[in-house]
Image (cartoon, rainbow, N blue to C red):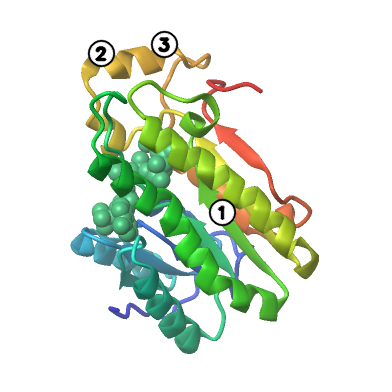
């Protein structure tokens, strides 16, 4: 863990003052935007990374320069024991962790006839088991605190399915089941568990898609444009803060109208 501290508490919002937030996969993309937005509201942010150490340090550094508190924390979320160690160390150091954003995710797209077992396992292990791992280790702290906010970053693929993404869609649909079940288990103790389902957001993940696939996706968006990581971050901050205290077990899309129930 690489400490990044700053005593200057000049933050923009302040709705999350005194809170500690763990954001998985926060070195880049949506996770990065979420980390920065949470810090702007006053939360101390634990910027988790797996491969992108330098980028995570950069995010923590940016937050500090802006007057917030942040620390880059390396951990592969698909590793149950490693997640346990990370959570124990952070809880001992900070005394409490109030917000968990399960954002880490990968794709390994392929048609079902060609999909390998490795491609399937990699996506499920990261996207779904990764969220179980962090929730499983943090739940006892939330219960003891009688409060907490968990936000799982799912996807419209988990609601609608997507050709070539049976592994990814299964992981994101699984995340919705996990969200609703844990929400029911923890609701009476003041813990809110919700899912955010982004549509087509401009990040490294979608940059890698073939041009044809990107054009096809863009045509499916009633608002006629892709979304930004910051637009996903705004909803996530709302779900992490006190204004959403009576909302749990919900799946909310940020998708320009792509998926309407
Ligand atoms: P990126 O590919 O830009 O970023 C993925 C992030 O996940 C990286 O920070 C990466 O960290 C992290 N990650 C991957 N594997 C692990 C792991 N084993 N342990 C810890 N962190 C890991 O993707 P996005 O920002 O676009 O996606 C973020 C989330 O939003 C994902 O869950 C994705 O499925 C979801 N989403 C994205 C959409 C989009 O259109 N972009 C649409 C719907 C949902 P590192 O680089 O350090 O390994």
Determine which quarter of the picture holds residue 65.
bottom left
Q: Which residue is mark 1?
A: 151
In x, y percent, where is residue 213?
29, 17
Q: CA distance from mark 2 to mark 3?
A: 11 Å
Quarter of the image for residue 146 reads bottom right
Pinpoint residue 128: horizontal percent, then vertical percent.
Answer: 45, 50
Pick the quarter of the image with the N terminus: bottom left
Query: Compared with residue 114, is residue 7 higher up or lower down, i.e. above or below?
Result: below
207 over 125 or under it: above or below: above
Mark 3–mark 1 Cα distance, whole angstroms, equals 28 Å
Instruction: Say which mark, if any, is on residue 212.
Output: 2
Residue at 37% over, 65% down = 47
The quadrant the C terminus occupies is top right
- SS class, disc 3: helix
For mark 3, does the 10 Å Cα neighbourhood hold few (<14), some (14 to 19), or many (20 or more) residues? Answer: few
Classify residue 182 by image quadrant.
bottom right
Give the x, y percent position of residue 37. Answer: 48, 54
Mark 2, residues whose alpha carbon is within 10 Å: few (<14), some, or many (≥20)? few
Residue found at x 43% / y 73%: 69
Closest to the observer: 173 or 235? 173
């Amino acid at each position: 863990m690489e400490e990044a501290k700053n005593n200057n508490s000049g933050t923009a919002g302040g709705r999350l003052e005194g809170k500690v937030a763990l954001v998985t996969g926060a070195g880049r993309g949506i996770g990065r935007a979420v980390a920065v937005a949470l810090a702007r509201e006053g939360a101390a942010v634990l910027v988790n990374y797996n491969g992108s150490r330098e980028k995570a340090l950069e995010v923590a550094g940016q937050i500090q320069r802006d007057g917030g508190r942040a620390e880059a924390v390396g951990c592969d979320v698909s590793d149950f024991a490693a997640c346990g160690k990370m959570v124990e160390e952070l809880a001992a150091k900070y005394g409490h962790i109030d917000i968990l954003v399960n954002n880490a995710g990968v794709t390994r797209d392929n048609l079902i006839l060609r999909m390998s077992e490795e491609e399937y396992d990699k996506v499920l292990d990261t996207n779904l088991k990764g969220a179980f791992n962090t929730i499983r280790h943090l739940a006892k702290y939330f219960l003891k605190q009688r409060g907490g906010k968990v936000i799982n970053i799912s996807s419209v693929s988990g609601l609608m399915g997507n050709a070539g993404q049976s592994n990814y869609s299964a992981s994101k649909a699984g995340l919705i089941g996990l969200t609703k079940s844990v929400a029911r288990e923890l609701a009476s103790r003041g813990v809110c568990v919700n899912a955010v389902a982004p549509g087509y957001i401009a990040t490294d993940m979608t940059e890698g898609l073939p041009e044809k696939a990107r054009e096809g996706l863009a045509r499916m968006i009633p608002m006629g444009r892709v979304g930004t990581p910051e637009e996903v971050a705004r909803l996530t901050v709302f779900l992490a803060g006190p204004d959403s205290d009576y909302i749990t077990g919900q799946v909310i899309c940020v998708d320009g109208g792509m998926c309407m129930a």
